[in-house]
Image: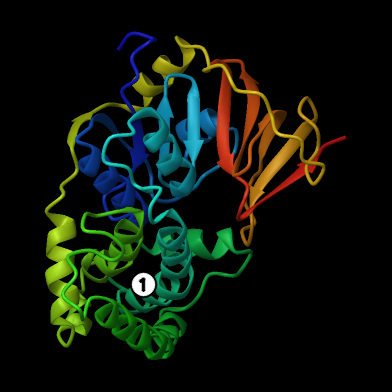
Amino acid sequence: MPASDPTPILHHYDFSPFAEKIRLAFGLKGLAWRSVDAPSVMPKPDLVALTGGYRHIPVMQIGADVYCDTRRIARELDARWPSSPLLPATCAGVATAIEAWAERDLFWPIARFVSGINADRVDPRLHVDRAAMRGKRPPSHERLRTVARRELGAVRPQLRVIEAMLADGRPFLVSDRPTQADLAVHHGLWFLSAMPIDCSGELDGCPATRAWMARVAAIGHGRPEPMTAREALEVAAGASPSSLPASIDDDSLPPPGTPVAVSPDGYETEPVTGTLAWVGAFDVAVQRRDARLGETTVHLPRVGYTVVARA
């Protein structure tokens, strides 16, 4: 792949619900993209070499620019491929609000429910890895099953909310075409059947939701082609980061040029370290230099992340 090729590269794994959100975004925009299978648990040496420490999935790479978090990835997709916008201007506010609800109040109870039901059916390293991300000890299978029973009580009311949103017969949540709100709500429900024990029977009383899910799934994933992690790193090493616009003036963050560490809130994981290269209204960019890759720019959202100056 030539260094100037803008084809997005997605680092992901098959049962990642947040990766499913971006795979559908590629489908909505009809994009060709490169698919790199990343490990679901640490260590992830190739991924963290690219991101400078960020270990979450998915990560989108375009040349030597690295985009972390699905919200940041979605904004970049709309900027580069504005056709079929994920956040149309006419409904961006309400779609963003639904996305925030879906990825907090809806998704996490579902994730804990499904993971607990499947406690002894998945790679045991997954439980150890996810506990370590939160700074907790590895849970027992019995503990996970207890949590699953508790979380089901939170899942069922949220499913009724979605059914009520669709009760008037609308095809999608906030528009007559799918938006980021649909992708964000869908990926949580998609996870109900992503593990060996299928939990999607919880949707049996939600016919409008099931029909809507089929419409969203029909979007597809665009045109993926496989790529190895080594090839993706070679792309980064052979490219230069894109030029950045002027930063906004915002004294709530360190000024551009400051060495910083950027961390996702609520996790005990390695931060992305480098020089703060750009501050925008919604996002920041961190410039890094790696012995193997040369210069890269890592792009992260502001909401849900902490940016601190390093000595």
Counting from the top left corner in percent of width and height, residue 75 is at 45, 40
> Which quadrant does the N terminus fall into?
top left
Q: How is the image coloured?
A: rainbow
Image height of 71 relative to 155, above or below: above
- Examine the rendered structure and indicate whether residue 244 appears above or below residue 107: above
Judge by depth and name the residue closer to the eye, 143 or 69: 69
Residue 121, horizontal then vertical, whole percent: 27, 70
Q: Residue at x 57, y 31 (%)?
A: 298
Label 1, secondary structure: give it. helix
Assess disc 1: are there few (<14), some (14-19) or many (≥20) residues with their C-alpha within 10 Å of its C-alpha. Answer: many
Q: Is residue 153 left or right of residue 97?
A: left
Say whether residue 203 is visible: yes
Tell me the residue at 30%/81% (across/down).
159
Q: Amino acid at mark 1?
A: Ser
Name the image quarter holding the C terminus. top right
Residue 241, compared with residue 280, is above or below; it is above
Query: Is residue 69 at all visible to an observer of this figure?
Result: no
Q: Position of residue 157 (x, y in %)?
A: 36, 88
Q: Nearer the viewer, residue 212 or 225?
A: 212
Residue at 46%, 70% in the rendered image:
101
Q: Position of residue 301 (x, y in %)?
A: 57, 45
Residue 28 vs residue 22, the one in the foreground: 28
Task: Please give left or right for residue 293 compared with residue 28 in the image.
Answer: right
Locate residue 43 relative to residue 122 in the image: left or right. Answer: right
Q: Which residue is mark 1?
A: 115
Q: Is residue 234 above or below residue 69?
A: above
